Image: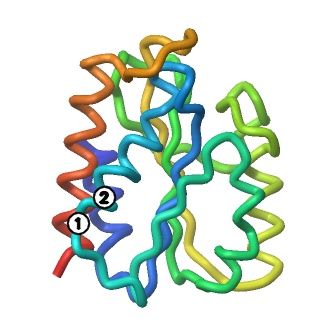
Amino acid sequence: MEQLKTIESFLSNAEKTLFLAIGSELRTDDAVGMYIADELLKYNLNKDKICIIKGATAPENFTGEIKKFRPAKMLIIDAADTGKKTGEIDIIDASSVQGASFSTHMMPINIFIDYLLQYFDCKILIVGIQPENLEFGLNITSKIKKSADKLVKLIAKKIIS
């Protein structure tokens, strides 16, 4: 899968990498980013090189923490309706994102990114996973979990030494 190769390449030779999970844990598959963050937090991470933030529905509340960490690379993970098959992992262009049509978070991600880039230079990759269900619920669907677990394994392989 081309997207997984892009993610793997992005994470290669990462000095300081920040993972920002976005989504609502109350809206079934919208919680996929939060699920991935929780899974990555189970690993023994070098906190000087890796930072994982569960931004939930208001990642802008964590701009201070992000600016303090000053990542060289930032991987943003969220559910994203890209019109693809359920569970498909896609790379999202920040400039094409228009607020709530991308996710349930408050501030449009492109504005959030533009704000952060005023304070430090950082390569950013946005990863979206096509949701199956965004209704209220506490558990992600099995197809989304399968994609999320695949992404966790790929990320862990690249960042855990």
Q: Residues within 10 Å of mark 2 (few under 14, many from 20)?
A: some
Residue ID at (71%, 85%): 120
> SS for tag 1?
loop
Q: Tell me the CA gap for discs 1 and 2.
A: 6 Å
Q: Where is 148 relative to 85, above or below? A: below
Q: Residues within 10 Å of mark 1 (few under 14, many from 20)?
A: few
Residue ID at (66%, 31%): 102
The residue labelled by disc 2 is: 40
Q: Which mark is residue 133?
A: none
Total of numbered circles in the picture?
2
Q: Where is 33 relative to 44, above or below? A: above
| The quadrant where residue 8 appears | bottom left
- Left or right, 31 with reference to 147: right
Callout 1, which amino acid? Tyr
Q: Which mark is residue 43?
A: 1
> SS for tag 2?
helix
| The quadrant where residue 56 appears | top right
Percent from the top left, x then y, of residue 148?
A: 30, 38
- Left or right, 58 with reference to 26: right
Task: Please report contact status of discs 1 and 2: CB closer than 8 Å, yes or no.
Answer: yes
Callout 2, which amino acid? Leu
- Left or right, 59 with reference to 14: right
Residue ID at (83%, 67%): 115
Report the quarter where the C terminus lies. Answer: bottom left
Residue ID at (48%, 32%): 31
- Left or right, 72 with reference to 42: right
Report the quarter where the N terminus lies. Answer: top left
Percent from the top left, x then y, of residue 159?
A: 26, 73
Percent from the top left, x then y, of residue 62?
A: 70, 64
Q: Where is 71 relative to 147, above or below? A: below
